[in-house]
Image (cartoon, rainbow, N blue to C red):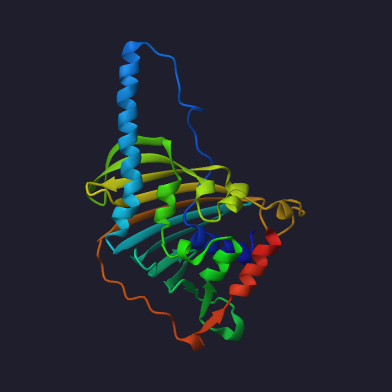
Amino acid sequence: MWSRGMRAGVIVSAAVAGSMVLSGCGDDDGTRTQGGGARASAGASVDAQEQGTTAVRAAYDRTAEAESARMTLKIKVAADGETVTSDGKGVIDLDEGDSMMTLTAQGKTIEQRVVDQVFYQKVPGQKTPGAKPWIKIDLKKAAAQQGVNDQQISDPAQMAAYAKAINDEDVTKVGSEKIGGVDTTHYRVSVDVTELPGGARMREQVGPELPMQVWLDDEGRLRRQQIDMTVKAPSAASAEPRSSASPRQLKMSTVMEFSDFGAEIDAEAPPADQVADMTDQVLKENRKRS
């Protein structure tokens, strides 16, 4: 069983670093010796690949330009033989980063909000100082611990960072699919971890590249993003006995879907007297595992 602290750490890591996945694939250098016909075919393939790279990179800006959207989220996390799944839905401000979401996990309904770069969560029956119904985690402090500045975490989906980190040679068009009744183009993408906020630390835990899948609509906006990653425990945690509450590694699958672009969102922080600040406790637990 993995601890409540590890679960909280996963939430903070996801909120700060955005979505992550395990190592990429593809040829080492992408070069081959071919005949004339093959070269022509390869040239057409390169052109298509460049178009795909351009489309995927532009998708993050195009999606952000919508300002807001409804979002669904499916997460599956597995560690030490235990699997936790959750389904969520809500609205997100693609400009300011605020969001409101309700998740269902292990038979419980969880409320989550992000307001002014502070993460709030309400879990039925959770134990908090003063028996407050809500906890909060300051994402700016969490980001600072991971070497990420305020500007980098203001974007809820780390859109600008992903656009910069996509490798030219690792964008592959998969085909066409309908997502929520909307025609989309499906791409497989490799993300250079070192180009992401907090990339040096992420590289130690997930490897140098992160494979990701995206589905873009006819306007070039994200309709679905899927990430499957394996996160290695820090070396200090790996050296602990097997009986430790911290797992040696965890596997996470995250699928986000966007719809109803321009949807109204009015995210407000819970009343202060109903909130317990857990930022320092969570960051202390994270430092112990580093």
Q: How many marks?
A: 0
Q: Name the residue: 43% across, 50% down.
A: 162
> In the image shown, does 181 or 160 lie closer to the viewer?
160
What residue occupies the far bottom of the structure in this picture?
273
Q: Position of residue 158 (x, y in %)?
A: 43, 57
> In the image shown, does 242 or 6 lie closer to the viewer?
6
| Quadrant of the drawing holding the N terminus | bottom right
Q: Position of residue 233 (x, y in %)?
A: 66, 52
What residue occupies the far top of the structure in this picture?
35
Q: Name the residue: 49% across, 62% down.
A: 15
Q: Name the residue: 44% across, 14% down.
A: 33
Residue 8 can be seen in this image = no
Q: Position of residue 279 (x, y in %)?
A: 58, 73
Q: Name the residue: 50% across, 63% down.
A: 106
| Quadrant of the drawing holding the C terminus | bottom right
> In the image shown, does 3 or 97 lie closer to the viewer?
97
Q: Is residue 223 left or right of residue 151?
A: left
In this rendering, is residue 48 above or below 280? above
In this rendering, is residue 121 above or below 143? below
Q: Position of residue 254 (x, y in %)?
A: 45, 53
Residue 11 can be seen in this image = yes
**Based on the displayed image, in which of its 4 quarters is residue 143 positioned?**
bottom right
